[in-house]
Image (cartoon, helix red, strand yellow):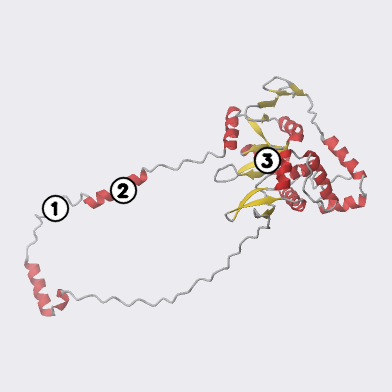
Amino acid sequence: MAELNLTAKGTEQERILAYLQENASDVLTEKINNGTPFEKDGKTLINKKTLDGFIKFACDEARKQAEKGARSACIDDATVFGWAIHYFEEESIEGALYNEDGTEFKPTVKPVQKPEVKKVEPKKPAQQQASLWDMLDATEKQSVNEKAAEQPVDNSDEDDDDDQPTPEEVEILAEIAEQGQEEKPVPKQGSPMYQHYMSIQAQYPDSIIAYRLGDFYEVFGDNAVKIAEELDLTLTGRDCGLDERVPMVGFPYHAADVYIAKIVQRGYKIAVAEDLNTVREIAVDKSETIIDADTGEVISDTPTPRESETDILAHEREIAKAFDKEALIKLSDLLGNIFTLG
């Protein structure tokens, strides 16, 4: 396995680095060591992430848990390790940005221009040209008015078609009608990955679709919101080629049995999509036995994940013995009690 190009500062970062070194796939290792493309200010940059950046990300995630009423202030190691995989895997999370030539990217700060104040002079009233009527004197005007009053009113020449539209009005009405018949914009369908996810969701409408993407299984849309609330997972979002980011929640593939068992035990069906052609549906029958709906195989009466929560706790305590207890207490306080000390 290739060495990760990360520098650990302090014991807590060393633990995260050790976990990543042991569990990162080749794809994730490539992202960590060489960075990923990132668009900002109209430029294509290289996005590289550090352990310092992850610690800040983890503190923000813990704060979100507290703000939405988490049941306790203690966040276990498995959750923090999951955050670490997500932080370095998700390309939309911004880390340290570099230009393509390797130099550090510095955003261009445009100077604020004060609006130019122009002095507006009041307009002079326009001088109207005198008409022939204005040039007549009072006597002549009175004579004209008297002659007009003596003339009989003849309405016989009035046009009976005054209510009919003029050719100009017909042309305007035609243009308005054409504008109303213009084709409506076609709604965006999303990226190929999201279209495939939604096609699987259509095949399994009663199931939650867990879609394998790299080192994670990911759930999208309303089901992601539901699972995040049920399992106290962090709800994020992914750019799927739509106008807005789609709600998304994920869990690491190496701990998938733990999360799948929890989802199924809460009464949900879950369809696990490994690739484009492999989908297996998992549910709970009336006897509370977890079965594979495609093969009929009994997975377990009592789910036994690869690494149970008891095993994780025992593993934490073994690690804690290798370090000075006072140092671990200070570290736990600093990071918001992410370690369980025995």
Q: Position of residue 169 (x, y in %)?
A: 25, 51
Choose mark 1 or mark 3, whichever is in front: 3
Q: Is 255 above or below relative to 160?
A: above
Q: Amino acid at mark 3?
A: Val
Q: Tag 3 or tag 2, which sits nearer the N-term?
A: 2
| Residue at 69 percent of width and 26 percent of height | 283
Question: Which residue corresponds to mark 3?
Answer: 249
Q: Quadrant of residue 184?
A: top left
Asked whether residue 164 is in view, the answer is yes
- Report if the CB atoms under discs 2 and 3 are less than 8 Å apart: no
- Most extreme residue toward the front, as rendered? 101
Q: Which mark is residue 175?
A: 2
Image quadrant where one finds the C terminus: top right
Q: Position of residue 201 (x, y in %)?
A: 60, 31
- Report if the CB atoms under discs 2 and 1 are less than 8 Å apart: no
| Residue at 59 percent of width and 27 percent of height | 203
Q: Amino acid at mark 1?
A: Asp
Q: Which mark is residue 159?
A: 1
Give the Cα distance between marks 2 and 3. 49 Å
Q: Amino acid at mark 2?
A: Glu
Q: Position of residue 253 (x, y in %)?
A: 73, 35
Give the Cα distance between marks 2 and 1. 27 Å
